[in-house]
Amino acid sequence: MIDILETTAHPTELEQAQSVWSACLNILNENVTSQSFKTWFEPIVPMNLRGGTLTVQVPSQFFYDWIEEHFEGMINSTITRVLGKDASLTYEILKEETPIEAEQEVVLPPATRAEKRTFPPQPESFRLGNAPPASSRQNDSANGNFQTFLNPRYTFDNFIKGESNQLARAAATAVANNPGGTSFNPLVIYGGTGLGKTHLIQAIGNYAQAHNKARRVIYVSSEKFTVEFVEAIQSDRINEFAAFYRSMDILIVDDVQFFSGKEKTQDSFFHTFNELHQLGKQIILSSDRPPKELKGLDDRLLSRFQWGLTADIQPPDLETRIAILRYKSMNDGIELPGEVIEFVAANVTTNIRELEGCLISLLAKASLEGREITIDLAREVLKVVVGDVRSPITIEEIQRNVCEYFSIPEDLLRAKTRKQEIVNARQVAMYLAKELTNSSLKTIGLHFGGRDHSTVIHAYQCVEDQMKIDSKYKANVDQIKRRLELRGKV
Ligand code: ADP
Ligand code: MG
């Protein structure tokens, strides 16, 4: 057991927590596999130690549930060993979706089964001088001591660039460097769920604060804005509410589609918007659809949304998905085999949140079952996460992939053109159709603008011959083939 007061002269709560947690880690490290340790214990951040209660922060609810289910006993006995039997452990969950909920805490007494407890919510953010949450604590002095509700995890550095988010990212960077000073005011980012809107708009706030581009930054979801507005009316504090939001240098409002139908809130937001805009302050909004398709929103608000720049985020293409998985696994200190990354990226296509979920499940399964990370393991995980077994590869899919690979329009495969690059792509697609599907030569020919079966045989042989003499050509064909195969395997 460590006697903290004796080991350090006047340790802060943070220093105490760090020293206690590091003693715990030493014990835990001896009791779990090194991969489990890396995956589940290294990411935990000690926060403070108060009256025998150690508070640590975990990255997500999933993370918390997992360690509670699998390591609870071990963690409790470790805490008891280090701090004594009256000690307890509290978890702070750094929640990804809505940082306001990050204050949900869970208390685990060391010896008994944990009982989840949600602490009462903090005072509203517009009551100045309240204690900021862990996620924005470092912003204290910069912004005049109120909660920014920015999640420090969302930065530009860890936002992977791709064609799907190019414009949005570029605009966001410009705004972060010069808030209120570009014509991108408001900046509206829209796109489907899990594609990185929240990440990107918060990255602007984090960057602007870190680089002293703005002092007062606040992130708020439209729902939270609405709730606060209603509460402010009820408690007769509407002036305070309005003044608070109108004092910002950067106002970031997430998911404005939820303003739909809430006329009074929209009215209040309208005035806030106008005032900030007039003062040259930056407004950043996100929405799940383009502003002109937002229903139930006042026209005058909609027209203002279109004053600045509207940029979309599209679902990530394969290359971006691969880059994201590579980055995130490296960040977790785990090097995934390339083929596993490609396999996951080829099969999880809808959004980035799901991609992350698969990666976490994969690491978790490997770590818990003590298994190597292979395609087989990934397949097991994906069956649960992605669901049904995919249908077999189709000729259309092959055509689409080949054209994407060579960057040519798909209809040219079926056209009469004899341009070399088109002929080449067409032959590769025919070859792969023969290799990867059970279609007859005749059927394949029909898919390529009604060509004859002898044309398909000829193409097949050309590709085979070329692969024998040209290793670069062979590598290209193999790569397309592998991607298609990976995609068909789940
Ligand atoms: P949205 O707000 O559009 O629903 P989020 O911003 O919450 O999506 O993103 C979902 C998850 O995917 C987050 O964990 C986020 O960090 C991650 N993410 C999204 N886009 C990227 C990207 N380009 N690079 C890295 N991570 C990303
Ligand atoms: Mg979001």
Image (cartoon, rainbow, N blue to C red):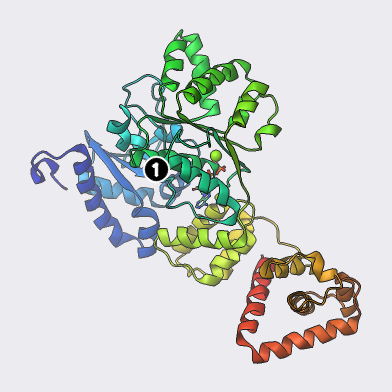
Q: Tell me where residue 361 appears, x and y as whole percent.
A: 52, 56
Q: Secondary structure at mark 1?
A: helix
| Snapshot quadrant of residue 447 | bottom right
Is 202 left, or right, of 297 in this rendering? left
What's the residue at 46%, 60% (across, down)?
A: 327
x and y, in percent, of residue 238 in the image: 47, 11
User: Can residue 95 be spotted in the picture?
Assistant: no
Looking at the image, which is closer to me, 122 or 396?
396
Residue 29's place in the image compared with 234, above or below, is below
The residue at the point 64 percent across, 61 percent down is 347
Q: Is residue 40 visible?
A: yes
Query: Where ligand 2 lies, by quadrant?
Result: top right
Q: Identify whether 171 is placed above or below 466.
A: above
Q: Give x and y (percent) for residue 272.
A: 50, 20
Disc 1 target residue: 207
Residue at the image point whose x is 35% and y is 64% from the top: 34
In the orientation shown, which residue stands out farthest toward the top? 236
Amino acid at dot 1: Tyr
User: Up-down: is 237 above or below 251?
Assistant: above
